[in-house]
Image (tube, helix red, strand yellow):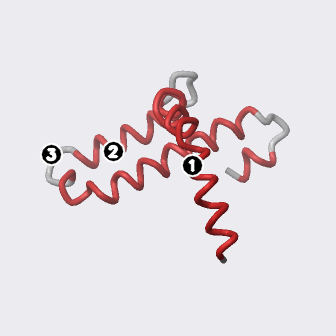
Amino acid sequence: SIKAIESSNKEDDTTWLTYWVVYGVFSIAEFFSDTFLYWFPFYYAGKCLFLVWCMAPVSWNGSQVLYQNFIRPCFLKHHQAVDNVLGSLSTRA
């Protein structure tokens, strides 16, 4: 991430930040479902392949596909409510 931020080409910044958003959502989902998922055969091999697909240096990598089709629409739908909640929490603090 630091290499992407410090580079002169800013397109890789978007690529890696998109990856970290997808990885964060994946980590949260995995936290709640890991007790059930680890029973599946080849779960960790599938997880590794999924993460490699998310990092792949191609235009159709997993991060771009998941972000554009799932995470971004959900964010755009709910971002105003989240901003309102965070604003009210900051005024209370």
Q: Which secondary structure lies at badge 1?
A: helix
Q: Nearer the viewer, residue 82 or 3?
A: 82
- At x 44%, y 38%, the residue is 52
Residue depicted at x 36% and y 38%: 49
- Residue 76 is left or right of residue 93, and the answer is left
Kindly identify the amino acid type of the residue bearing the numbered disc 1: Ala
| For residue 53, side relative to residue 58 (left or right) | left
Near-viewer residue (86 or 30): 86
Q: What residue type is labelled 2?
A: Lys
Q: Which mark is residue 93?
A: none
Which of discs 1 and 2 lies nearer the camera? The answer is 1
Between the C-alphas of marks 1 and 2, the distance is 32 Å
**Quarter placement of the C terminus:** bottom right
Q: Residues within 10 Å of mark 1 (few under 14, many from 20)?
A: few
Q: Which of marks 3 and 1 is nearer the N terminus?
A: 3
**Is 4 positioned to the left or the right of 52 in the image?**
right
Tell me which amino acid carries mark 3: Pro
Which residue is the extreme one toward the bottom? Answer: 93
Q: Name the residue under label 2.
A: 47
* Residue 10 rendering spot, x and y as whole percentages: 79, 36
Residue topped by disc 3? 41
Q: Which residue position holds label 1?
A: 81
Q: Is mark 3 on a helix, strand or loop?
A: loop
Q: Few, some or many C-alpha atoms within 10 Å of disc 3 (few <14, some 14-19, many ≥20)?
A: few
Instruction: Single out the mark in the foreground, 3 or 1.
Output: 1
Return the x and y of residue 39 as percentages of the image width and height.
14, 53
- At label 2, counting other C-alpha atoms closer than 10 Å, the crowd grade (few under 14, some 14-19, many 20 or more) is few
Real-space Cα separation, disc 3 to disc 2, in angstroms: 11 Å
Residue displayed at 48% across by 27% down: 69
